[in-house]
Image (cartoon, rainbow, N blue to C red):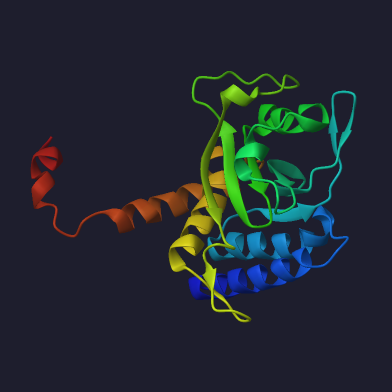
Amino acid sequence: MSKSGVADLAAVYVTATKKIAATSGSNEATYYPDIRNLIAAILKERSLPFDVRVNTSESRGRGTDMPDFVLGDGGFVGVYGEVKLPEETLDAMARSTAQNDQIGRYLSATGVVLLCNVRGFGLLAVKPGVRRERGTPIQPDDRELICSVDLWSAASGGAKPSVDQAAVVLLCETIDRAVTDYALLADPADLAKVLARQARDAKDAMPSDLRPISALLDD
């Protein structure tokens, strides 16, 4: 799928989720299919070796969590995802200790959580220097909301909206960073794919004229 395809799907996502939000009786699970489709499209566009599973059961120390969604590498969980209704802010989600500090426990397990309040998405991570211990929740002051994007506010155009390109790019980068900068990988072949993508990005970012850094090249 091309970047323009992701932008089109982001517009479809905004239309569908706003329609759901306008109906009574909707809950987080009502939005799962649209969230899954959007994230899956971004992973495919970026050629990232993860799939999206919604409403899964993941075992923990003395029980079972039901993450709203996970990004996985086969049967391996790389990123936990948390969904709340549009009235909840991403900042509030990032500091939440609800449900026996579920967010804190997710962070202790993987070091990263994708937040979604339907309106948009946020990348939550553990602050640099904070030590993670499996089973010990990461406290709110030790969490960092790395980036966030509000798709609803970035959409315009009435019944058939378009989403601002900058917001689409930021959304793609948010998903990309979750799985390339933070998520664990189960298969060495998948790690090779991620490193190859990062190498391509680095090569594309190099200037065509290298004369300004000739001294560095000589060294």
Q: Residue 73: in sight, yes or no?
A: no
Q: Can residue 25 be seen in this view?
A: yes
Q: Where is residue 193 in the image (x, y as percent from the top left)?
A: 53, 52
Residue at the image position 8 percent from the left and 39 percent from the top? 215
**Left or right: 20 with respect to 171?**
right
Q: From this view, report whether residue 213 is shown above or below residue 20.
A: above
Give residue 213's position: percent from left, percent from top.
Answer: 12, 45
With respect to residue 139, does 152 lie above or below? Answer: below
Image check: 46 left or right of 113? left
140 or 75: nearer the viewer: 140
Where's residue 21, x and y in %?
76, 63
**Placement of the N terminus among the 4 image quadrants:** bottom right
Which residue is pictured at 64% across the width and 45% down the height? 89
Assign the C terminus to one quadrant of the image: top left
Q: Which of 200 and 183 is in front in this view?
A: 183
Which residue does the image show at 55% across and 65% down from the upper left? 45
Image location (x, y in percent) of residue 46: 53, 60
- Depth check: give the residue in front, 57 or 72: 57
Quadrant in which residue 142 is drawn: top right
Determine the image quadrant of residue 67: top right
Examine the rendered structure and indicate whether residue 85 appears above or below residue 38: above
